[in-house]
Image (cartoon, rainbow, N blue to C red):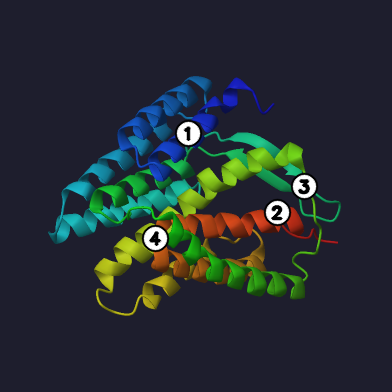
Amino acid sequence: MLFDLQLLPGYLLFIVSILLCFFRMVKAGWIILAIAYVLAFINGGISITGVAFLLTEVILLLLAVRYSSGWQRTTTHIAFFLLSVLLLTHQLPGFSNVLIFDRVRFTPDAAPFTMHFNLDKPFAGFAIFTCLLKLGYVEKYDIRKIGKAIIIPLAAIIAICILTAWALHFVAWEPKLLLHYLWIWALHNLLIVAVTEETVFRGYLQGYAGSNVFGKQPYYLSLMISALLFALVHTTGGWPLMLLAFIAGLGYGVAYHKAGIMAAIFTHFGFNLLHFLLFTYPMLGKS
């Protein structure tokens, strides 16, 4: 199943993420992105309606990069961001995301976990990442700076979120390796989930929108807002997951403030990986 041709567009999206987000190779990334969506269209993963939404996103991306001031910039960015959120949250028709894990229980008492190769969510992430690159909101990567920026926020998130989740009976101590699942889960979680969500909530909301709306106000205003909105899109686990997402979002925001988008991405992935390996994933099932 994991080597089915239907999954080829998803694997190409992994390559796009590496080229575009990690090596900042915009042209090569978008060429492979186009190939991935052509294959998805041939495979039936995306319809004409879905293609129309993606083309609209591209047009808004080009306009958002073009306009440097005035009402055109404001209205274009609002439209660009709203369409991105609709793609991010799977609210638009025209996409048939390929099933990877179908209600898998990683441990006997865990809630069932389902995972798809989404075609709508990553496109929004890659479009916004490209926008941030073109507007100068993605800094040069400094491995040492990124590493130092991750340590304290990640440690704080682990301590606060895990203790809170344990107190709420949301997770339990359940170490596991699950090599059969780990490789595809880890690639997807890093290259699609963490990249997309941190690009939208930290890079765009906290970084671009925060600097333009709040100006010289304290950075924690945009950090709090981005963490709150991050929590609001995590409704699948009810209020406990939303609370944990808010706490985690604060930590990701601190990492972003210290060293930029890559620090936020690796802090996000680091916490998710620890959760997957050592605790109930995604959460305890209802007894």
Q: Which element type, helix, strand or loop, lies under badge 1?
A: helix
Nearer to me, 77 or 267: 267
Q: Which of the marked residues, 1 or 2, is nearer the chain's N terminus?
A: 1
Q: CA distance from mark 3 to mark 1?
A: 25 Å
Q: Label 4: which residue? A: 260
Q: Residue at x 51, y 44 (%)?
A: 192
Rendered image: mark on residue 177:
3
Q: Label 1: which residue? A: 15
Task: Say which quarter of the image contains residue 206.
Answer: bottom left
Rendered image: mark on residue 276:
2
Q: Residue at x 70, y 42 (%)?
A: 182
Q: Residue at x 38, y 58 (%)?
A: 203
Task: Say which quarter of the image contains residue 159.
Answer: bottom right
Nearer to me, 53 or 227: 227
Q: Which element type, helix, strand or loop, lies under badge 3?
A: loop
Does 81 appear above or below 183?
Answer: below
Residue 210 pos. (x, y %): 32, 68
Q: Which element type, helix, strand or loop, lies under badge 2?
A: helix
Q: Which of the marked residues, 4 or 1, is nearer the chain's N terminus?
A: 1
> Could you tell me if the residues under marks 1 and 2 are in contact, i.e. CB atoms within 8 Å?
no
- For residue 94, side relative to residue 110 (left or right): left
